[in-house]
Image (cartoon, rainbow, N blue to C red):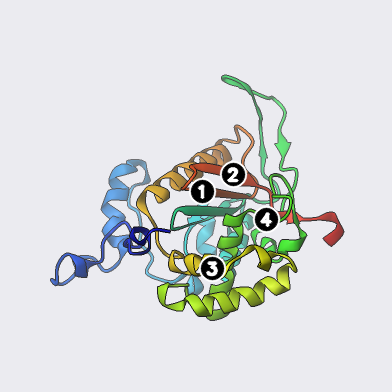
Amino acid sequence: YPDAVQTTASFFLLDRNDITNKKPKYASVGHAMQGAVEELNPLLGKCDVIEKSVTELDMSIVKEYDMVVASRLSIDDAGRLAAATTQTGGKFYLVDCFGYNGASLFDLGPDHSYRTELGKNKISKDLYNLETYVPLKDIWNIPLSGLTGKRVDKHHPPMIYMQYRAIMEYNAKTKKWPSYSSTDEFEKVVREWMKTTSSSVNKYISKELLHDWARTATAEVSPVCAVVGGIIGNEIIKAISSKGEPANNCIIFDGQTGKCRNVLLQHSKKNG
């Protein structure tokens, strides 16, 4: 990645220290965005801001929502939130952007059904279920060597998916996100994890690539976020309306090529 990406501010809202030394007007990013969200979505009415981490959150609160979209969660928190959401018939989307790339893992629940598109303005009368359902909490347990499904590369899983898994596994083991100052530690932790999940993946991953992954792990580049947000928004509309076959259960976006892929993550038969 070029230096411009590595030094880009990680969020849409610039750090207040880059603008002014005055006392901040808002207590959190949620409060800063609240007015804009309510103005853009007037049917929502008042949009509450909950000042708790997901770890401290009472999971019963998700019963109020049909869709939950989250970002920058740990593996454990994402699994808990997804399970609580789908238990009451909701849909859960975990979405993250890192440098020029983005990825989303989602859990539509075991009973999701949809009507397929037969042509322009034509929808099938019959309802179909997802051909394979894998809960989000189980996706993390699929080793890279046992991964199979639609559009999974022949010799190794998609590189962007491996990048995302590496970032998440590092967070799970260290309780922090990779950064420019933790490249060596990131390489060590990820190498050890890769040994447990695949005997061959390590040879495809160079030291330089792992360091790039660490440096850009929390670099949320605005155009990439905008594109990935649009893609996930389209998937959410399909899930709400049950019109059109939804992606199942992973989407990855490559900002350098502009390509988006739907990857079905599941255990290969020989690995159970």
Among numbered discs 2 and 4, the one appearing first in the sequence? 4
Q: Is residue 84 left or right of residue 229?
A: right
Q: Which mark is residue 210?
A: 3
Q: Is residue 27 left or right of residue 2?
A: left
Question: CB of mark 4 within 8 Å of CB of mark 3?
Answer: no
Give amino acid for label 2: Arg
Give amino acid for label 1: Asp
User: How far apart are the two marked residues, 4 and 3, measured between alpha carbons?
Assistant: 16 Å
Give amino acid for label 3: Leu
In this view of the protein, can residue 213 be seen by the observer?
yes
Q: At numbered mark 2, what does the secondary structure look like: helix, strand or loop?
A: strand
Percent across and percent down for residue 94 are 53, 57
Q: At numbered mark 4, what does the secondary structure look like: helix, strand or loop?
A: loop
Question: Quarter of the image holding residue 164?
Answer: bottom right
**Residue name at image x 26 percent, y 59 percent:** 32
Among numbered discs 4 and 1, the one appearing first in the sequence? 4
Q: Residues within 10 Å of mark 2 (few under 14, many from 20)?
A: some
Q: Which mark is residue 157?
A: 4
Which residue is the site of mark 2?
261
Among numbered discs 4 and 3, the one appearing first in the sequence? 4
User: How far apart are the two marked residues, 1 and 3, measured between alpha carbons?
Assistant: 17 Å
**Residue name at image x 56 percent, y 35 percent:** 241
**Residue name at image x 66 percent, y 29 percent:** 116
Which residue is the site of mark 1?
254
User: How far apart are the two marked residues, 2 and 1, measured between alpha carbons?
Assistant: 9 Å
